[in-house]
Amino acid sequence: MGFDKALLVTGAGGQLGLAFADLVPDAILLDRDALDITSRDAVMDAVRTHRPDVIVNSAAFTKVDQAEAERDKAMLVNAEAVRHLAGGADEVGAILVQPSTDYVFDGDKETPYSEDDPTGPGSVYGVSKLAGERHAANAKRHLIVRTSWVFGEGRNFIRTILKAADDLDELSVVDDQKGLPTYAVDLATGIIGLLDVGADGLFHLAGGEEPATWADLAEHAISVSGKASKVKRVTTEEFLSTRASPVAPRPKNSVLDCSKARALGVSLPDWREAVSRYLTEARLTQTSSPDE
């Protein structure tokens, strides 16, 4: 994929950062060790040194349950650090791309959430990401992209399910939360597509076609992988009754309305096709050798 702008990616060791690394070989890739985004001085040094046209902030505190006990850390990484990046972007005239999440919504709406719907996060993680959006929006040039249920290279729900399927004949998976699974490679491609058409402001971008529950996603991944485990569909309440440690609230409805991006010619592939492609590329099917 051709991309003729100088691109700086923070959090380059995460799922989205790794996807950008594959798509834009010339990108400036700064992982957690190379750039601590919570340090304003470090951020300013990095942007002054590299003078990017685009900054994609793929660094984030994504441990949703852990954030409940580590609110200060979640707010520092997901919110305050974005303030630093916005300032850095303004100094060098870059556009700041801030990925965000479906968790900024309460999940009570019956239909998909549009960019204009009121927010109301129920978790510390959601609160911290919404605060990050607001800091990003203060940058003179910004692109905020909400997405959902991301999977890609590294730790994710699909890998967890497939690992469990190696040991268990039946897996209990929540069936009363729905969303749009999103392949990190497709998300990065979509963000580049939005940048190419000059988009700015707030957009929703997630996997295409019909929404899924976590049970749907697990069942499809297990089927494509060639494993024999069955999925037992359970309610959130039933699932939580088996957990010893605290679990952050999740929105029941995480489905994002992506029609605003689609109107600009940017949409992501069907999540089912994306899962199949991911499993093949990550060598997680029975016809290939696992890569971990």
Image (cartoon, helix red, strand yellow):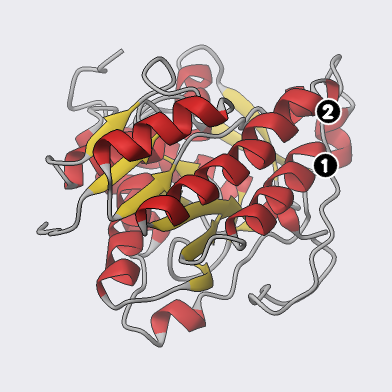
Residue 16 rendering spot, x and y as whole percentages: 38, 41
For the point 78% across and 56% down, the residue is: 252
Relative to 97, 81 lies left or right: right
Mark 2 to mark 1 CA distance (whole Å): 7 Å
Residue 77 rendering spot, x and y as whole percentages: 63, 31
Task: Tell me the SS state at disc 1.
Answer: loop
For the point 83% across and 59% down, the residue is: 106
| Residue extending farthest bottom | 263
Q: Is residue 11 visible?
A: no
Tell which of 228 and 94 is nearer to you.
Answer: 94
Tell which of 24 and 238 is nearer to you.
Answer: 24
Quickly name the residue at label 1.
Answer: 123
Amino acid marked by disc 2: Glu
Quickly name the residue at label 2.
Answer: 68
For the point 56% across and 25% down, the residue is: 39
Amino acid marked by disc 1: Ser
Mark 2: give few (<14), some (14-19) or many (20+) Cα within 10 Å: some
Q: Is residue 179 visible?
A: yes
| Contact, mark 2 vs mark 1 (Cβ under 8 Å) | yes
Find residue 202 and name its label: none
In the rendered structure, which disc, 2 or 1, sits on the residue that comes first in sequence? 2
Task: Tell me the SS state at disc 2.
Answer: helix
Relative to 170, 188 lies left or right: left
Where is 78 relative to 203, above or below?
above
Mark 1: give few (<14), some (14-19) or many (20+) Cα within 10 Å: many
Residue 56 rendering spot, x and y as whole percentages: 39, 48
